[in-house]
Amino acid sequence: MEEGMMMVTKKKRFGVLLCAEDSELVRKKYGGYFGVFARMLAEEGEIWDVYRVARGEFPEDDELAFYNGFVITGSCNDAHGNDPWIHQLLNFLQKLNSMNIKVLGICFGHQILGRALGGKVIRSPTGWDIGIRTVNLSSSSSLNLPSKLSIIECHRDEIWELPPKAEVIAWSEKTGIEMFRYGDHIMGIQGHPEYTKDILLHLIDRLTQHNLIHQEFAMESRLKLAMWEPDKDSWKRICVGFLKGRL
């Protein structure tokens, strides 16, 4: 190396595909859902961008090669819906898949990934899942996962049919596909590893106010939430490890 030359290290770059509008609580306390995800996943020296895909904001094609990975968030919309932005997102995810770019999908993100890859998403025949649930993780997976982990859940849709060539790596008594992997570059998680209890309690209040869940169910969900803790540190290690190639 010539004298005076310096080694330049390319910074890792990630994007959050934001599929929901920020609630007042999340915006004020965490800097929006982007802030929630950045707090869990971002490490020193990285660049993190946000694209509000529900408003039609997507990266340009010529920017994609600069990204190490993307995260898809939860949403109030249905992953089996036909909103124009959802079809735009499906096309975008298929493009990321063809480029073998790392993609981590959470809740709606998990479901829309399943749909984009050829699986089927439906309204769950057993209704809402809200609270903390223990999921079973596959011992046959190459990811070296623990056998059980608890996670915050808030969904009424689910992946019903797995995409071809995908692998189920977690399931629960309520949902058959809690987590899946597609190749070594795509992973979906039905629960919310990024949520805190106060975010879920706020969501329960909003769902009750909009008559999407009954008061009795809301009360039961709050009581159960007070009894258990999610395995947040373990989920963080899994998400960060997958997204950054450490698993």
Image (cartoon, helix red, strand yellow):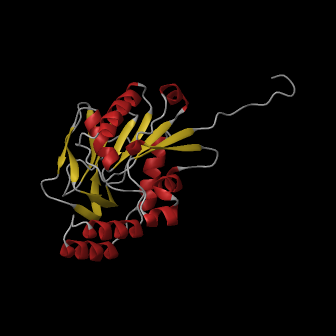
Image coordinates for residue 163, horizontal then vertical, percent? 24, 34
Q: Which of the 4 image quarters holds residue 207?
A: bottom left
Q: How many marks?
A: 0
Q: Quadrant of the N terminus?
A: top right
Give the residue furthest to the top.
Answer: 2
Image coordinates for residue 141, horizontal then vertical, percent? 32, 42
Question: Along the line of sight, which residue is nearer the eye, 13 or 234?
Answer: 13
Question: Along the line of sight, which residue is nearer the eye, 74 or 27?
Answer: 27
Q: Which of the 4 image quarters holds residue 129?
A: bottom left
Give the residue furthest to the left.
Answer: 125
Image coordinates for residue 42, horizontal then vertical, percent? 55, 50
Residue at 53 percent of width and 29 percent of height: 63
Image coordinates for residue 22, horizontal then vertical, percent? 43, 57
Question: Along the line of sight, which residue is nearer the eye, 185 or 95?
Answer: 95
Residue at 45 percent of width and 31 percent of height: 101
Answer with left or right where residue 188 lies relative to residue 122. right
Answer with left or right where residue 166 lies relative to residue 28. left
Q: Is residue 153 above or below residue 50?
A: below
Give the residue furthest to the right.
Answer: 3
Q: Quadrant of the C terminus?
A: top left
